[in-house]
Amino acid sequence: MDSKICILVLDDDPHMTRTLSDILALNGYRVVEAWSAQEALDLVAAQEFDCVLTDVRMPGADGVEFYRQARRERPGLPVILMTAYAADEIIQQGLAEGVIGVLDKPINIALLLGFLAALTRQRGVVIVDDDPEFCRTLGDILRRRGFSARPFSDPHTAIETIVDEAQVILLDMKLNGITGLDLLRQIRARCPSLPVLLITAYRREMVENIQAGLKISAAECLDKPLHIPDLLEKLLLFQLQRLRQALSEQRAAL
């Protein structure tokens, strides 16, 4: 499978899509062009994209209407608006409804490339569970959905190794020789804001530990067997929140 980030560029100006496509391809990204919202929606339904760059004002459906329809097909798809009209009311609607952010035309290429570099990094899910089969199965599922999944079936692995590539940690509450709460405390000492989802097949038995984990900023506790659509929705939400932050940080740094 091609591991390159794949970007859909939507604009009714073919010169704009071609210019962006050439720049992004030169920087190692795969790019698909579309010149109408309907064409882009057909493409989104037919294949996976990591990000969409869409003009706001186009004949027919505008960029925000495209986003509304696209998220029905791909709920977690990151969408960035491109516009020459900074005060456009449509943009504010898009931001309120969940688009990642807005790039003003002419596009600041350094800002765009910085955001896409952050997008590449925002896929790391670490699974900490002493059941190797569970780790393998869940890891395979997440990788098929485009995440970079790294399992740890030995909960005594050095904490710096566990958090090194993590954008989100899935942490079992009942581990061999250590509780998930103890490991969470170690994670929090090193990474106070790293998202951690607790998982357990023993909610009644672990209720006090779960409550203690939530008090030190675990995001939530999910029951085993995991409901994969719900898990994916939560992971995508974390990703979208981090991408908004990454775009804001890139903008501030330039």
Image (cartoon, rainbow, N blue to C red):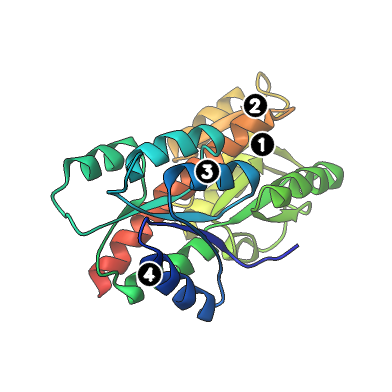
Image spot of residue 26 (x, y percent): 52, 81
The residue labelled by disc 1 is 173
Marks 1 and 3: CB-CB under 8 Å?
no
Which tag, 1 or 3, sits closer to the chain's start?
Answer: 1
- The residue beneath circle 3 is 236
Q: Position of residue 27 (x, y in %)?
A: 51, 79
The residue tagged 2 is 206
| CB-based contact (under 8 Å), mark 4 and mark 3 | no
Marks 2 and 1: CB-CB under 8 Å?
yes
Is label 3 in a helix, a strand or a loop?
A: helix
The local crowd at label 1, few if under 14, some if 14 to 19, many if 20 or more residues have their Cα within 10 Å, is many
Asked if residue 73 is positioned above or below residue 126 in the image, the reply reads above
Q: Amino acid at mark 1?
A: Met
Q: Which comes sooner in the sequence, label 1 or label 4? A: 4
Residue at mark 4: 15
Q: Amino acid at mark 3?
A: Leu
Q: Nearer the viewer, residue 118 or 151?
A: 118
Q: What element does badge 1 sit on?
A: loop
**Neighbourhood count class around disc 4 (C-alpha, 10 Å): few under 14, some 14–19, many 20 upward:** few
Query: Which is more toward the observer, 82 or 13?
Result: 13
Is 19 on the left-hand or right-hand side of 161? left
